[in-house]
Amino acid sequence: MAFTDKIYVKNHRQLASQLETNIPKGAFAGATLDMLFTGDGLSKLDSTTRDRILDFAEDFLDCDCQANPYCGCAERKFIRYVLELRAEGLGPQAIVDVMTDDYMVYAYTGDVRSFLDDAVRQLEAVETLADVEGNDEMSAKARRAKRELSG
């Protein structure tokens, strides 16, 4: 299961009530994106919720792909966002708090911790392969990124 499949809409029931329909809890689920970003869905929401959703759309769903928002760009941008928060020194719980404040989405702390741990392991593999191939530049880049994520 991809990390972005474990990102959930905060106040899911309240949102569904405002929209007067059922929506999936997953923030990146196709039906959630359809309900929130097409038709008159946004006009039914209170201003605070609408602002957060518009921020989410602007920051993650803005791409030129014909398949937008189903092209995968949103998920990649969100992963980059989480990695940047970690590089700023935030721990898993702080990352969850920031994403909730910024976009009204959340994840379980353990899922964020697992994602970050997997990212470090992948960077270790990149570093090792770069060393084997004699690619000192890539090895150094992976090592720096690993240090940023490891804290």
Image: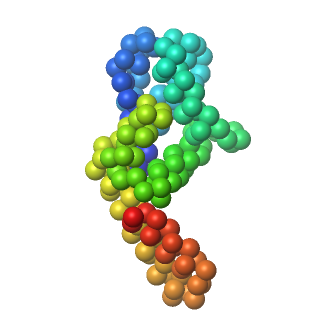
Residue 43 against residue 64 in the figure, above or below: above
In the displayed structure, would residue 100 be above or below residue 72?
Answer: above
Q: Is residue 6 at least partly visible in the picture?
A: no
Number of numbered tags placed on the structure image:
0
Q: Nearer the viewer, residue 66 or 89?
A: 89
Answer with the quarter of the image where residue 108 lies: top left
Instruction: Locate residue 121, reporting x and y percent.
Output: 39, 69
Image quadrant in which you'd find residue 4: top left
100 relative to 95, above or below = above
Q: Give the residue at x 50% y 68%.
A: 145
Residue under the image location 47 percent in, 51 percent down: 85
- What kind of colouring is applied to the model shown? rainbow
Percent x, y for residue 71?
A: 60, 43
Say left or right for 59 vs 104.
right
Which residue sits at x=51%, y=88%? 132
Q: Quadrant of the C terminus?
A: bottom left
Q: Residue at x 71, y 41 (%)?
A: 64
> Left or right: where does residue 84 sit relative to residue 20?
right
- Residue positioned most to the front: 89
Residue 138 relative to residue 111: left or right:
right
- Which residue occupies the foreground of this view, 9 or 92? 92
Q: Is residue 80 left or right of residue 5?
A: right
Residue 39 seen in the current view: yes
Percent x, y for residue 119?
A: 42, 63
